[in-house]
Image (cartoon, rainbow, N blue to C red):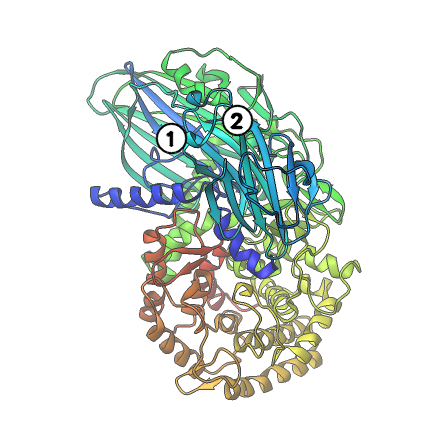
Amino acid sequence: MNKIYQKSEQAAGMLKTGFKQFITAAAIFIAFSASGQQRKAPAYPLISHNPYFSIWSTTDELTASTTTHWTGTYQSLIGMINVDGVFYRFLGKEPEHYKTIIPAADEKSYPVQYTETEPTGDWKALQYNAADWKSGFGPIGDIEGLDKVIWKTRDIWIRRSFAITNVDEINKLILKISHDDDADVYLNGEEIFKKVGVTNDYGLIPVDKNKLKTSENILAIHVINTGGGSRADVGLVDEEKENQPANVLVAKQTGVNINATQTIYNFKCGNVDLNLTFTSPLLLNDLDILARPVSYITYKVMANDGKKHQVKIFLSASTGLAVNKPAQEVIAKKFSSGDLSILKAGTTAQPVLQKKGDDLRIDWGYMYIAVPKAYNAAQFITTEKDASNAFYNRNTVTTTKGGTNLALNTVIAFNDVSRVPVSRFIEIGYDDIYSIQYFNKNLRPWWNNSGKNTIENELSNAAASYKEVLSKCSAFNKSMYADAEKAGGEKYADLCVLAYRQSISAHQLVKSPQNEILWLSKENFSNGSINTVDVTYPSAPLYLLYNPQLLEGMLNGIFYYSESGNFKNNYAAHDLGTYPIANGQTYGEGMPVEESGNMIILTEAIAKAEGNAGFAKKHWKTLSRWVNYLVNEGFDPQNQLCTDDFAGHLARNANLSVKAIVGIACYAQLADQLGDVKTAAKYREIANQMVPRWMQLAGDNDHYSLTFENKGTWSQKYNMVWDKVLGLNLFPQEVYDKEVKYYLSKQEKYGLPLDSRKTYTKSDWILWSATLANNKKDFESLIAPVYNYALETPTRVPLSDWHETLDGKQVGFQARSVVGGYFMKMLYEKMVNKPKQ
């Protein structure tokens, strides 16, 4: 597939739990609405640290779905409470468990027959003679060293034979398939699956088991590669019957609330009330706390009837947190360290930094569940499917230490619980050992840059500072919300809350070999790039607000890439590679005006936020090369991509031209801050002269066009916001007023479309465009539909920044850092009120 198509196709196709989960989520939303349950988010962050350590709930009631990684893959957390012998489940839902019938390639390779020449006869039939077909082993694809059969033609036909000893023993037959691109699958000659497009990872498709024979069977597959990568991989699994205790009740959820660093649930569990708080202390102004990969789960219980009750609380964490695929073998153990009792698990293989890509989970390093010894908690290891039964049957004995799909279990006894609240906490942490490969050097996480620290020490420090950290989180939660509400109103503040943890946890913090901070993003559900400049650009407002040093960390790698001679073009690179491997750009095409403008604008934004141009001074030669590219090529851009690459190439892009003009003016302002008055005057004059030409070429009566001299079109001119935020004073007020008035006339139910070509939008850009408004009413009018989208979208995934304005459905992308751009209005208010240096 081509790169642009791949971005949107991956976003849609990689929701690998699939249509079934989508329908379930939509149905749950309808039911909750009818019962008065208020939605607070499209998905709820529970554990948020980095692209690999990120757990979410995709339903309004915490017990209505299995918790997942942001990619949609199950990473199950189960919580139960025993109140005087009555059991309630308050967290998560048991995931489906599958038994392999015939393995797909995530478990082991398997023999196949195949041909790349269209076969004659009924090639799908069980008795077909395929003696002249080639023999090989699955998986089949185009990746050397991974795929057993290398396939680079348009079509391939595959036959896989297998035997079944007893069909009646199968509970529910499921086809397990991954393909790129179009696929048809037949079982014993009958079609069981057909799809145009890609199924990344594995789709799970129910199949009538009566199509099987208790003897020999044949799976026949035809896959068409329409462009780009190719893949064909199939297996069959049996969805096992539920193995959970029948007498466990579902706790009644009485409320849920989200703030910047916490998601808080309230439950009624018979005669006891439970307050459950997930805290990921992502405090941007404290890098030690920010980088520590430890979250808290806090239980606070109290009687609601005035009597005393015996209470025990159980947490079961699946080792799915430490694998990319469920079939991967893990090893687990229980131990103690200092004042903590700890459970630990990770894969036996430990393939450190051996995978790169988008729809992936970490399968190296180790997950940890830690609890203070003072609680006298019981900790034990079981299989995932046996964990809840073990708690129900009061059996806290470790039954396994290795295998697949294990669970790390912790039981805390609260003893006599009365109307006085009793609080306990558990820590959940992850040590990834090495986080990033940066120009062929493996980098440890920030918290262990020296290699001399340990995760046990971090868990201990987190436990010792629990009250202090929660106090800091509480203070920040309040101040952030108050500042956001003051800047843009209550709905705006709520949007900023949704964006905060999501944006931060799409990054990893490391230190470069040059001893520079690196705050590296993953381009989630887009193409998996690392440190993409046009992802940094929309994300920047959040980090400029709370710690500009982190924005420096988003630019340092791109500067190094050019200044080291590794990137030899006279414009800025698009990315540093594919996460977590940052060895150089892997995106197939440059965005020369886009990325050069982004880098210069953000460097000036750092200078304004920090009150000096010291960061720019270190990179002046590089900035000078980039600005000259903008002067020569930026005003009337040739046919090229911009950050909205999913919309395709565009020549004479008026909004991209704005970026070039603003970038040139930013360079002039930096020169002035560095005392180079002559250079400042030269480039300021160049930018000033471009503005009236831009107004003339883009002018279209009551608005400005999508492309120059193309009347009847329009687009959001979100790049213009930096003119206001940085005080450049390039464009006259009439341009802002005209555009905002026109935007208000083009809004749909769920927001302002990106431009006149389609009805989809990017919500981060809407928040930027809204900041162009010169009054509160217009700003709130533009952001209100985005707020409605967040609460009404039928697509229950971590906030998607690319959605359809007519029905609120996700078009692509999710869990991306770009929602940090929601903070643009707050940044504007801070910058315009910043005392002059």
Q: Position of residue 196 (x, y in %)?
A: 50, 53
* Along the viewing direction, whichever of 86 and 290 lies nearer the viewer: 86
- Is residue 487 visible from the viewing direction of this image? yes
**Secondary structure found at label 1:** loop
- Is residue 421 visible from the viewing direction of this image? no
In the image, residue 607 above or below residue 234: below
Q: Which badge, 2 or 1, comes first in the chain's sequence? A: 1
| Residue that appears at 37% across and 30% down | 91
The quadrant in which residue 263 appears is top left
Location of the C terminus (image quadrant): bottom right
Residue matched to label 1: 93
Q: Amino acid at mark 1?
A: Lys
**Secondary structure found at label 2:** strand
Badge 1: how crowded within 10 Å, few (<14), some, or many (20+)?
Answer: some
The quadrant in which residue 92 appears is top left
* Along the viewing direction, whichever of 714 and 206 lies nearer the viewer: 206
Badge 2: how crowded within 10 Å, few (<14), some, or many (20+)?
Answer: some
Q: Amino acid at mark 2?
A: Thr
In the image, residue 525 above or below residue 130: below
The quadrant in which residue 683 appears is bottom right
Which mark is on residue 810?
none
In the image, residue 34 above or below residue 325: below
Q: Position of residue 119 (x, y in %)?
A: 61, 47
Q: Position of residue 137 (x, y in %)?
A: 67, 35
CB atoms of marks 2 and 1 within 8 Å: no
Front of the two marks 2 and 1 = 2
* Along the viewing direction, whichever of 643 and 72 lies nearer the viewer: 72
502 vs 312, left or right, is right
Name the residue at the right extreme: 565
Which mark is on residue 100?
2
Location of the N terminus (image quadrant): bottom right
* Along the viewing direction, whichever of 395 and 553 lies nearer the viewer: 395
